[in-house]
Image (cartoon, rainbow, N blue to C red):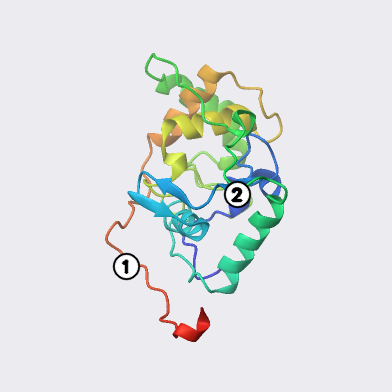
């Protein structure tokens, strides 16, 4: 994906086991749920639009053209994973990692301590990670402020079910909440909301 990604991240960082793990960003069934209404865009979007969002937000990069090999390959893979899922099927609750958050504010001091104990070995003291092996959690090479993981309910659930990598599910919801809030308390790239997304003009015969 060289040329489309500015962060030190890969799809597998948010979609564990190649997008096949329940509560790990599973892609199974995703293809059958598009087109769908998108609240952020205020319009109906296609799967290609959603993938473009991932490049713009989570990868802090630029979207591949919809007729490009990267885009066609990603769509084809998600379609293959979703084979057998009826069109319009709702996602299974058991596949989602989004959780209701505790009512009390997160404890950043405890989150910092937990980060040092459970996360720092892979993601480093400065949150910078190790290249694309252990992704950066904040800083210039991480996901930007518009990414799904920049939302506390999403990153909390992801951490709760999938982290640390060598002991997934070992953190309580309260612990995941605190460490996720600590991660999000650090600076990260700002989403370039007014950047233009340009795809090549195509002759009518292409369609």
In the rendered image, the quadrant that contains the N terminus is bottom right
Judge whether 104 appears above or below 98 on screen.
Answer: above
Q: Quadrant of residue 23?
A: top right
Residue 110 showing in the rendered view: yes
Q: Looking at the picture, how far across and down is residue 112, in whole percent?
A: 47, 26
Residue 163 appears in view: no
Whether residue 23 sits left or right of residue 45 in the image: it is: right
**SS type, badge 2:** helix
Q: Residue at x 62, y 29 (%)?
A: 161
Task: List the single residue furthest toward the left.
Answer: 194
Name the foreground residue: 179 vs 125. 179
User: Residue 39 lies in what quarter of the image?
Assistant: top left
Considering only vertical position in the picture, is 12 above or below 120?
A: below
Residue 204 percent coordinates (x, y): 45, 83
Residue pointed to by mark 2 = 32
Label disc, if present, on residue 196 of the rendered structure: 1
Quarter assignment of residue 24: top right
User: Mark on residue 126?
Assistant: none
Q: Residue at 48%, 54% (x, y): give it.
A: 50
Label 1: state its secondary structure: loop
- Residue 170 lies, in percent from the top left, at 66, 22
Q: Residues within 10 Å of mark 1 (few under 14, many from 20)?
A: few
Q: Residues within 10 Å of mark 2 (few under 14, many from 20)?
A: many
Mark 1–mark 2 Cα distance, whole angstroms, equals 29 Å
């Amino acid at each position: 994906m060289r040329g489309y990604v500015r962060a030190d991240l890969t799809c597998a960082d948010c979609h564990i086991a190649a997008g096949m793990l329940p509560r790990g960003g599973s892609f199974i069934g995703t293809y059958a749920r598009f087109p769908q209404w998108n609240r952020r865009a205020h319009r109906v979007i296609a799967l290609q639009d959603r993938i473009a969002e991932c490049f713009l937000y989570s990868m802090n990069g630029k979207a591949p053209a919809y007729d490009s090999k990267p885009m066609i390959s990603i769509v084809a893979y998600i379609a293959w994973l979703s084979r057998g899922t009826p069109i319009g099927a709702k996602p299974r609750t058991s596949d989602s990692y989004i959780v209701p958050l505790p009512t009390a504010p997160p404890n950043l001091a405890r989150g910092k301590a937990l980060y040092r104990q459970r996360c720092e070995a892979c993601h480093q003291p400065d949150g910078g990670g190790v290249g694309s092996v252990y992704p950066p959690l904040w800083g210039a090479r991480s996901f930007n402020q518009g990414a799904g993981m920049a939302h506390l309910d999403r990153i909390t659930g992801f951490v709760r079910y999938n982290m640390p990598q060598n002991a997934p599910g070992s953190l309580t919801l309260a612990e995941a909440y605190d460490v996720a809030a600590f991660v999000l308390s650090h600076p990260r790239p700002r989403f370039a909301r007014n950047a233009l997304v340009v795809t090549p003009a195509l002759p009518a015969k292409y369609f």
